[in-house]
Image (spheres, rainbow, N blue to C red):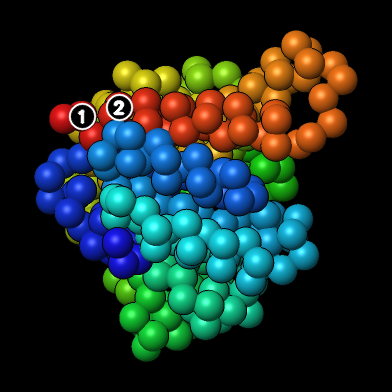
């Protein structure tokens, strides 16, 4: 199946009142597992590559090209997306490599600087047919400017979308990145207000810390794209630990990466059913 643009996947889901799962790729096994889970659930999916993952691999190209290859071989619609890029040069590289969408994060800057930097990225990406997500109201859990408790103001969101021309907006509504427990308390009333304030798809970051029932409720309240990473990493690591505990003499990484890939695929299939029930 040809690579599917992110905007097409998100637009169709939003029209149907469903959520789209966007899952972070750390290495090839993650990309394979995410697509396998999507095929099992018969749902579209977004493969995301974060700036942190680019730093881990030393470059965007190897992990991006691998993800694009896995996406093109999928039996369901799959998009490949650059996540949380703070560097405009990385955005330019992603566009040149063929990624169909980017998330540019200038949320740590003062509002006027965030608008200016984001608008410049949007103008570049739109010239190349690339969809742009941005962030307003820092998502907690990363330290520094990402302070828990920050919330996105609907009026400011409306002005930000109008000033930048972005295609999707990540908003702060109570979730935090890198949560190991699923007990985040979302502000559903705020999600509803944000959905009414702007006609741009809303994105929920830090969704690993949100329980299944609340993910379903968040989509019903107005969220469309739902980002998950840590939850999958927990499943991956748990499977590796279990295999090595049972096979302490194991030395072939394929013997434990295989079960880890299977565990992530199962987690993806489950979450896609939560976000987009049949």
Outermost residue, left side: 16
**Marks 1 and 2, how far apart at CA:** 6 Å
Above or below, 217 relative to 49: above
Of residues 117 and 245, the one drawn nearer to the viewer in this rendering: 245
Answer whether residue 218 is visible to the viewer in this image: no
Residue 227 x, y percent position in the rendering: 45, 43
Of residues 156 and 119, the one drawn nearer to the viewer in this rendering: 119
Residue 164 x, y percent position in the rendering: 38, 74
Q: Residue at x 37, y 88 (%)?
A: 127
Residue 76 x, y percent position in the rendering: 29, 50
Q: Quadrant of residue 235?
A: top right
For numbered disc 1, what is the local secondary structure?
Answer: loop
Above or below, 118 relative to 25: below
Quadrant occupied by the C terminus: top left
Q: Residue at x 20, y 48 (%)?
A: 13
Residue 166 x, y percent position in the rendering: 35, 69
Count the numbered circles shown.
2
Dot label at residue 274:
2
The crowd level at tag 2 (other Cα within 10 Å; few <14, some 14-19, many 20+) is: many
Q: Quadrant of residue 210?
A: top left
The residue carrying mark 1 is 277
């Amino acid at each position: 199946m040809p690579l599917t643009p992110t905007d097409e996947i998100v637009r169709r889901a939003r029209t149907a009142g469903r959520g789209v799962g966007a899952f972070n790729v750390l290495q090839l096994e993650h990309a394979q597992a995410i697509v396998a889970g999507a095929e099992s659930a018969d749902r579209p999916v977004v493969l995301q590559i974060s700036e942190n993952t680019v730093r881990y691999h030393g470059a965007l190209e190897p992990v991006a090209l691998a993800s694009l290859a896995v996406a093109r071989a999928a039996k369901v619609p799959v998009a490949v997306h650059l996540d949380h890029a703070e560097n405009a040069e990385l955005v330019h590289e992603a566009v040149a490599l063929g990624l169909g969408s980017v998330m540019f994060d200038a949320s740590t800057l003062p509002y006027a600087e965030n608008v200016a930097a984001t608008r410049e990225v949007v103008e570049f990406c739109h010239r190349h047919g690339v969809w742009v997500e941005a962030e307003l109201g820092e998502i907690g859990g990363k330290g520094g400017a990402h302070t828990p408790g920050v919330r996105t103001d609907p009026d400011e969101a409306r002005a930000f979308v109008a000033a930048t021309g972005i295609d999707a907006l990540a908003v702060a509504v109570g979730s935090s990145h890198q949560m190991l427990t699923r007990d985040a308390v979302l502000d559903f009333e705020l999600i509803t207000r944000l959905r009414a304030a702007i006609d741009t798809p809303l994105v929920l970051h830090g969704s690993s810390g949100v329980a299944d029932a609340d993910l379903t409720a968040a989509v019903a309240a107005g969220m469309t794209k739902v980002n998950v990473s840590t939850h999958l990493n927990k499943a991956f690591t748990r499977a590796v630990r279990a295999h090595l505990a049972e096979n302490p003499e194991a030395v072939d990484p394929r013997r434990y990466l295989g079960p880890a890939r299977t565990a992530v695929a199962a987690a993806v299939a489950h979450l896609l059913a939560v976000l987009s029930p049949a």
